Amino acid sequence: MNLNIDFKSKVPLYFQLKEQIKQNILDGKYNEGDLIPSEREFSDNYELSSTTIRRALNDLVQENFLARKAGKGTFVRRRRVKRDLRKVLGFTKNMTEMGLTPTTKVLTKKVIAANAFARERLGLKKGEKVVRLERLRLADDVPMMLETRYIRTDLCPNIEKEELSSSLWRVFEEKYGLKPNRHSQGMKISTVSGHAAANLTLNDNSLVFMIKGVTYVQDNEPIECEESLYRSDKYELTFEAIVE
């Protein structure tokens, strides 16, 4: 591990050490499961006190970058992406904030008759049309989420002809003049198999987070709904409860 500790800097030594180890992990110089140097090795190589080293490593354990295994050492932890369910945060921004490179693959986009799920959430009648958009979202080329969206064709005519691998909400606003202003969602634990499991590179019956949501524009008009599958081994979903 190539580190540059500046003993003349006003930045605390433990913080310099912590941030440089973290950056090495984010840059891919250390991968999930790799053993990092021991406290003795850090001390011998960089002339740091055990207190400084221990504080830096403890902070990285708390931040879920490292994990300790008794009698074996300290390892780079398999990190989960944190998503706060109270906030609407785009996939691209969420991944970028975690130091990951996001990409999107559009699997299908076609006009269909709205199914029961879409009719209920979008207030449509049987036979009315929607665009069914299925996208695979990846971070550092690893599948993270499989999302299926149903978009109203009366509000967004010919949207299936648009390039839909980036922000869907931006298309709503820039192409159709419809700015999303509210998004409701619910989450449950589910399992995947077949097509969904294959796209997420999971075994059949693997556990996932299933999030169902509806996006609204002005006048509380629903414009699209989603049914997305998040890999539970890659995501940590959070929310804050208020005690009354």
Image (cartoon, grey):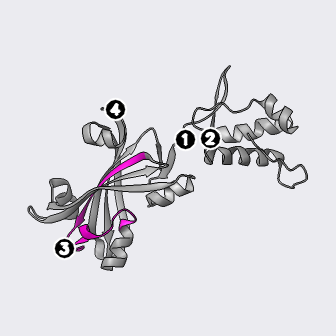
Residue at 61% across, 47% down: 26
Instruction: Answer whether labels 1 and 3 touch (C-beta < 8 Å).
Output: no
What amino acid is at disc 1? Answer: Arg
Mark 3, mark 4: which one is toward the viewer?
4
Say few, some or many: other residues with alpha carbon within 10 Å of mark 2 (under 14 / 14 to 19 / 20 or more).
many
Q: Give the mark nearer the N terminus: 3 vs 4.
A: 3
Q: How far apart are marks 2 and 1 (CA)?
A: 7 Å
Say few, some or many: other residues with alpha carbon within 10 Å of mark 4 (under 14 / 14 to 19 / 20 or more).
some
Q: Distance between the residues labelled 3 and 4?
A: 38 Å
Residue at the spot of label 3: 154
Q: Give the mark nearer the N terminus: 1 vs 4.
A: 1
Query: Which label sits on residue 203?
Result: 4
When the figure is inspected, residue 31 is found, relative to residue 174, above or below; the finding is above
Q: What element carries label 4?
A: loop
State whether residue 193 appears in this view: yes
Q: Is mark 2 on a helix, strand or loop?
A: loop
In this picture, residue 226 sits left or right of residue 129: right
Q: How far apart are marks 1 and 4 (CA)?
A: 20 Å
State whether residue 243 appears in this view: no
Q: Distance between the residues labelled 4 and 2?
A: 26 Å
In the depicted view, which residue is nearer to us: 36 or 84?
Answer: 36
What amino acid is at disc 3? Answer: Asp
Q: Give the mark nearer the N terminus: 3 vs 2.
A: 2
Residue at the spot of label 1: 79
Query: Which label sits on residue 65?
Result: 2
Q: Give the mark nearer the N terminus: 4 vs 2.
A: 2
In the depicted view, which residue is nearer to us: 238 or 18?
Answer: 18
In this picture, residue 14 sits left or right of residue 25: right
Q: What element carries label 1?
A: loop
Residue at 35% across, 33% down: 206
